[in-house]
Image (spheres, rainbow, N blue to C red):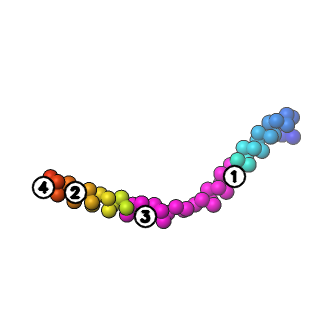
Amino acid sequence: MLGIEDPWIWGVYILCILSALLCVIYGTIKWNKGGEEEAREISEEAAWELEEEEMQEKELGL
């Protein structure tokens, strides 16, 4: 069979192909998950920065 007589080598090839397929399947399932959470985190961060700027203006009198 294609010059490969050792069953361990065939096993390694099969496991490499299966692991690549598993990675593709996992990627398609998890695609774009958490996008809503990221938008919420960005808005919280922007609000925190505005609050920090206001505190600096108040304390430093800028």
Q: Give residue 27's position: percent from left, percent from top.
A: 61, 56
Q: Earlier in the sequence, mark 1 or mark 4?
A: 1
Q: Give residue 38's position: percent from left, percent from top.
A: 45, 60
Asked if the residue at tag 4 contacts the one at tag 1, i.e. Cβ–Cβ closer than 8 Å, the answer is no
Q: Earlier in the sequence, mark 1 or mark 2?
A: 1
Which mark is on residue 61? Answer: 4
Q: Is residue 33 magenta?
A: yes
Which residue is denoted by mark 1 in the rendering?
22
The answer for how far apart the CA atoms under marks 2 and 4 are is 10 Å
Our reading of the magenta stretch's main secondary structure is helix
Q: Nearer the viewer, residue 32 or 48?
A: 48
Name which residue type carries label 3.
Arg
**Magenta part of the protein: which range?**
20-43
Q: Quadrant of the N terminus?
A: top right
Name which residue type carries label 1.
Leu
Which residue is denoted by mark 3 in the rendering?
40
SS of the residue under disc 1: helix
Q: Nearer the viewer, residue 45 or 7?
A: 45
Residue shown at 84% from the left, 40% from the top: 2
Q: Does any portion of residue 3 appear in the rendered image?
A: no
